[in-house]
Image (cartoon, rainbow, N blue to C red):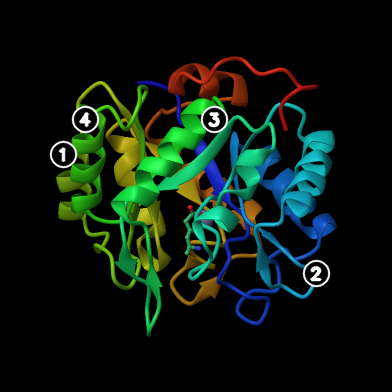
Amino acid sequence: MNKLIITCAISGAEVTKKEHPAIPYTIEETVEQAYLAYKAGASIIHLHVRKDDGTPTQSKIRYEKTMKAIRKKCPDVIIQPSTGGAVGMSRKTRLKPTELPIEMATLDCGTLNFGGDDIFVNTENDIKFFAKTMKEKNIFPELECFEKGHIDTVLRLYKKGFMFDPLHFSFVLGVNGGMTGEERDFHFMRESIPEHVTYSVAGIGRYEFSLAELSIKHGGHVRVGLEDNIYIEKGVRAKDNKELVEKVVEIAKRYHREIASPKEARQILGIKEFNHESIL
Ligand code: KMH
Ligand code: ZN
């Protein structure tokens, strides 16, 4: 089977140190979590940045400083900034990291409730604009789909020429307001995308490892990390992001899936080879 790409979502915008003390806020903490995840087997770091007090930000300067510092310790890792940011941020704010020379970023493919009164807004025009911006800047999008309708949106926009090859999906399942992450949900999502495209699965909360295992078994890729889930098993908090990645590596061993290096991950996804000097 193809090698397994592991993405680690080390920080997110919502989880705080109150819920898990290893959630990184400062640049130093962020670099440390990225480095440990990378050493454990993550070839992609999904990145949100925070101010030192934990407030989520899409500041271009904060991203640039953080990515440069990560790059020093993880020379070849794929850094994937978030263009989702935090609920309520404007389109312009969310796109700030795309003003930097990055190779990959997330692209959220539909609106959903996000718990309580929160709505994570991604209108059709937002999606088209984000896709166009990334295409123009040669940034490889990871298409985050929180339910099946988001896949349908991507495929419809692709047919109309607003989305571009190669399509790489991320099924983010288990958000309050999105689709659950049961086995049937995984199969429904996987069977709804064209056969030749790639996909990764991010299970939120209790779905993290059951979905990781299903994806590993069926040739997909996996995202884990404290952004999505803080437990290593029921009722037991993970020590840090490294422990979550290590658990995926263990599951992969059982299914004889080797772990992709960042270089191999670029080849699998179809990301053009990068130049350390010019790309963050
Ligand atoms: N923080 C969420 C509102 C992404 O990174 O693109 C959005 C999110 C998705 O985390
Ligand atoms: Zn995110």
Measured Cα–Cα span from mark 4 to mark 3: 20 Å
Measured Cα–Cα span from mark 2 to mark 1: 41 Å
Q: As drawn, is 182 to the left or to the right of 68?
A: left
Of tags 1 and 3, the one toward the viewer is 3
Measured Cα–Cα span from mark 1 to mark 4: 18 Å
Question: What residue would you read off at disc 1?
Answer: 192
Q: Are marks 2 and 1 in contact (CB under 8 Å)?
A: no
Mark with earlier residue (1, 4): 4
Is disc 3 surrounded by few (<14), some (14 to 19) or many (20+) residues within 10 Å?
many
Q: Quadrant of residue 107?
A: top left
Mark with earlier residue (4, 3): 3
Q: As drawn, is 179 to the left or to the right of 191?
A: right
**Residue 139 bears which disc, if any?**
3
Is disc 4 surrounded by few (<14), some (14 to 19) or many (20+) residues within 10 Å?
few
Residue at image coords 36%, 57%: 122
Give x and y (percent) for residue 198: 34, 29
Mark with earlier residue (2, 4): 2
